[in-house]
Amino acid sequence: MSVTFSCPQRLTIFIYVLLYIVSGNKRSAISPTCISVSSPVSFHNSTISNVHYFMMNSIQPSSRGTYCTGWKHWNTWANLFQTDITLSLIPSYYVADKFTSFQTTCILSYMSYLSLYVGVKPGTCFNYVSAVRYFLLNSGVDISFLDKGHLIKSTRTGIINHYHATHTVSEDRTLPLSCDMLIHGINNVFNSGSPQDRCKITALI
C-alpha cells in the first residue's frame, strides 16, 4: 500500500532527514543554492530545496540534536501505539473518550512513555514534546490541543513531582562545597597572591 503525503508533510519529512545528518554539528553542511533556471521543474526544485534549508535553520543548532532524538522516540512510540506520526490514524482498539481528544491522549501517552519507559528527566521529556510540537505544526497538524489542554499541564506537573519523589538531589546536582573543602582549597590549593586565584575564591564563596 502506498502512502501519499501532503506538501507540508513532505517538507517536514525532509527536515527529519536533515536533522539526522546535522544533529551533531554546530553548523549545517547543507547550504542554500541558486542555480540557473532551465525549466519550471528545475526552478521548483531549486526554490523548494532552499525552503528545506530555511526550515531546518529555524531550529537553533544547539537544539537540533534534542529534536532529532525526540523525533526518533516519537516514531518508536507511534509504532507501539499503532498510529502514524501525524496522528491521523486512529488504532482499531482505541475507544473515544468524551473528556479528551485522541491527539491529547497520544501526547499524554508519549509523555508517560518518555518518563517511565525511556526514563528521561522531566526537562528532557518536555523538550522532546516541544520537538514533536514543532514537527506536527510544520506538517499542517492543528496543535491547539497542546496549548489549551489542562490534562497535559497536569501531567507535566505530575511527572515533575514523581521524579522529585523518586530521585535524590545528589542524582541531579553536584554536591555543594562544604566549609572544610573551601578552607582546604584556600590554604593548600589556591595562591592567595594570584589575582586569578583570588577571583576563583571569591566566585566559590
Image: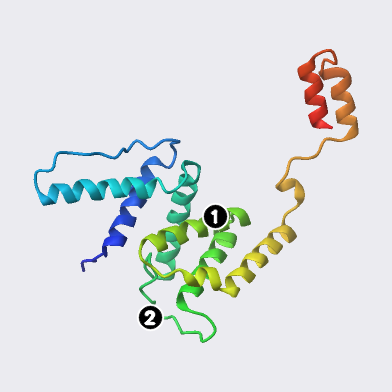
Count of all numbered marks drawn on residues in the image? 2
Residue placed under numbered mark 2 in the picture: 92
Q: Quadrant of residue 188?
A: top right
Which residue lies at the image location 79% right of the left edge and 23% below the top edge? 199
Question: Where, quadrant-wise, is the C terminus in this rendering?
Answer: top right
Where residue 85 appears, as percent x and y from the top left, is 38, 64
Number of the label disc, if any, that sits on residue 127 = 1
Q: Amino acid at mark 2?
A: Ser
Which SS class for mark 1?
A: helix
Where residue 200 appears, as percent x and y from the top left, is 78, 25
Q: Quadrant of residue 26?
A: top left
Q: Amino acid at mark 1?
A: Asn
Front residue (pair 188, 144): 144
The color scheme shown is rainbow
Where residue 121 appears, as percent x and y from the top left, is 62, 54
Position of 71 with respect to 113 (left or right) is left
- Residue 70 lies, with reference to residue 6, above or below; the image says above
Q: Is residue 121 visible?
A: no
Which SS class for mark 2?
A: loop
Question: Where, quadrant-wise, is the N terminus in this rendering?
Answer: bottom left
Which residue lies at the image location 51% right of the left edge and 65% below the top edge? 110
Which residue lies at the image location 41% right of the left edge and 62% below the top edge? 137
Position of 53 with respect to 1 (left or right) is right
